[in-house]
């Protein structure tokens, strides 16, 4: 089922039948946002995607003979945009992030998984709150979706965005944010922070560290803890600084939303030779997975993940990053115990409810039953 981009041919060509949750989307426009970032605009499929602001698409293609999957946050809003749009920024050594800008164009068709993800918030016309958002680089992508949705869906709410970039030419959506600030004057405030600022720069410059964050927060409206929602997405160092500051201010965890961007996937051959998984024990365990109306049973060997084993057995479970952060592979353990290599992608409440990530999950009992969907 691995394939990538292809050109449309004559109408008599037989169309590929895809499994549920997978679709071929046609690219209708490629927008050069900055020197190293593009937005890919897709036409909605015949049965339109229903998605939430802040969710992502998983793009799938074949590069050098291997199927590659990457998750890209939607910058489009489900309430303001008729099309779907993701933003891709080139990364040194990035496989998909460099392949897409070099190959995709209007008319291309890309295989995708339906939108998913938990970096979102519930919108309500009656809400009157302050969304304080911290973004760095391409971490702005889901924020754009959430901001556009908030400004329309919650007329009494406001957004303050602290957005860090390398330099002024690296600011993604700069013109769009200028227009939104004018259109929604008083309800959207964008604070730019540049590592390398030009001589005539009037804004903040330098690293978005604790001291700068403290100064910025002191200058934005204080709506009180109960009426403020905090969101962050960007480089790990930036998010750690924000997290530390919010913890020091005793912000409740249910008011903080975090999205991590990851690169690459776990190399299966490397994992086979990795150290034993703590708590996994020396023997294999049987796992039952319920997905898309079917039930699958298979045995997971020591130091193999549930997802790896399922894929090796031809079971097409959902996944994207394979690093335990995007949550595309999330399922609920109805019974048994699962050891996770990485828990960052799950909130404390999700872990308490029994959710696990199959891409970094190892069964440690024989009665593991996981429901995905």
Image (cartoon, helix red, strand yellow):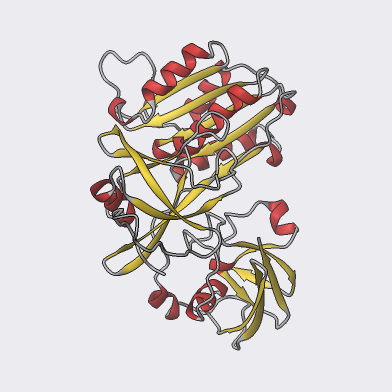
Find residue 256 and report its horizontal and vertical position in percent.
Answer: 64, 38
Q: Can residue 319 be seen in this snapshot?
A: yes
User: Can you say whether 8 is above or below 85 in the image?
Assistant: below
Q: Residue furthest front?
A: 12
User: Can you say whether 293 is above or below 194 in the image?
Assistant: below
Q: Is residue 29 left or right of residue 102?
A: right
**Image quadrant where residue 121 sits:** top right
Q: Can residue 245 be seen in this snapshot?
A: no
Q: Locate the C terminus by quadrant.
A: bottom right
Find residue 105 and report its horizontal and vertical position in percent.
Answer: 28, 44
Residue 353 vs residue 73, the one in the foreground: 73
Find residue 31 and report its horizontal and vertical position in percent.
Answer: 32, 34
Residue ID at (55%, 16%): 219
**Image quadrant where residue 64 sits:** bottom left
Find residue 91 and report its horizontal and vertical position in percent.
Answer: 30, 48
Residue ID at (35%, 64%): 3
Q: Locate the N terminus by quadrant.
A: bottom left
Give the mark count.
0
Residue ID at (57%, 62%): 329
Q: Is residue 100 left or right of residue 217?
A: left
User: Can you say whether 320 is above or below 137 in the image?
Assistant: below
Residue 23 vs residue 181, the one in the foreground: 23
**Image quadrant where residue 310 sits:** bottom right
Residue 62 vs residue 244, the one in the foreground: 62
Residue 145 vs residue 26, the one in the foreground: 26
């Amino acid at each position: 089922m691995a394939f990538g981009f292809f050109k449309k041919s004559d109408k008599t060509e037989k169309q590929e039948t895809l499994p549920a949750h997978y679709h071929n989307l046609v690219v209708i426009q490629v927008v050069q946002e900055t020197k190293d970032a593009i937005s890919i605009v897709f036409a909605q499929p015949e049965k339109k995607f229903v998605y939430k602001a802040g969710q992502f698409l998983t793009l799938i293609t074949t590069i050098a003979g291997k199927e590659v999957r990457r998750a890209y946050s939607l910058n489009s809003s489900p309430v303001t945009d008729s099309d779907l749009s993701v933003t891709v920024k080139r990364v040194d050594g990035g496989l998909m992030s460099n392949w897409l800008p070099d190959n995709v164009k209007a008319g291309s068709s890309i295989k995708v998984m339906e939108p998913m993800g938990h970096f979102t918030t519930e919108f309500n016309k009656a809400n009157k709150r302050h969304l304080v958002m911290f973004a760095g680089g391409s971490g702005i992508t889901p924020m754009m979706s959430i901001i556009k949705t908030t400004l329309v869906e919650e007329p009494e709410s406001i957004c303050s965005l602290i957005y860090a970039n390398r330099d002024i030419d690296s600011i993604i959506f700069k013109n769009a944010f200028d227009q939104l600030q004018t259109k929604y004057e008083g309800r959207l405030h964008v604070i730019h922070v540049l590592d390398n600022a030009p001589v005539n720069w009037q804004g903040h410059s330098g690293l978005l560290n604790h001291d700068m964050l403290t100064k910025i927060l002191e200058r934005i409206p204080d709506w009180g803890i109960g009426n403020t929602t905090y969101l962050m997405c960007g480089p790990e160092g930036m998010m750690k600084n924000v997290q530390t500051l919010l913890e020091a201010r005793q912000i409740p965890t249910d008011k903080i939303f975090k999205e991590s961007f990851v690169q690459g996937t776990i190399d299966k051959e490397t994992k086979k030779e990795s150290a034993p998984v703590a708590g996994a024990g020396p023997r294999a365990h049987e796992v039952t997975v319920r997905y898309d109306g079917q039930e699958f049973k298979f045995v997971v060997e020591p130091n193999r993940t549930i997802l790896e084993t399922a894929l090796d057995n031809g079971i097409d479970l959902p996944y994207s990053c394979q690093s335990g952060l995007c949550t595309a592979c999330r399922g609920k353990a109805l019974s048994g115990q699962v050891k996770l290599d990485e828990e960052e992608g799950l909130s404390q409440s999700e872990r308490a409810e029994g959710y696990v990530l199959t891409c970094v999950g190892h069964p440690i009992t024989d009665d593991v039953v996981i429901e995905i969907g």
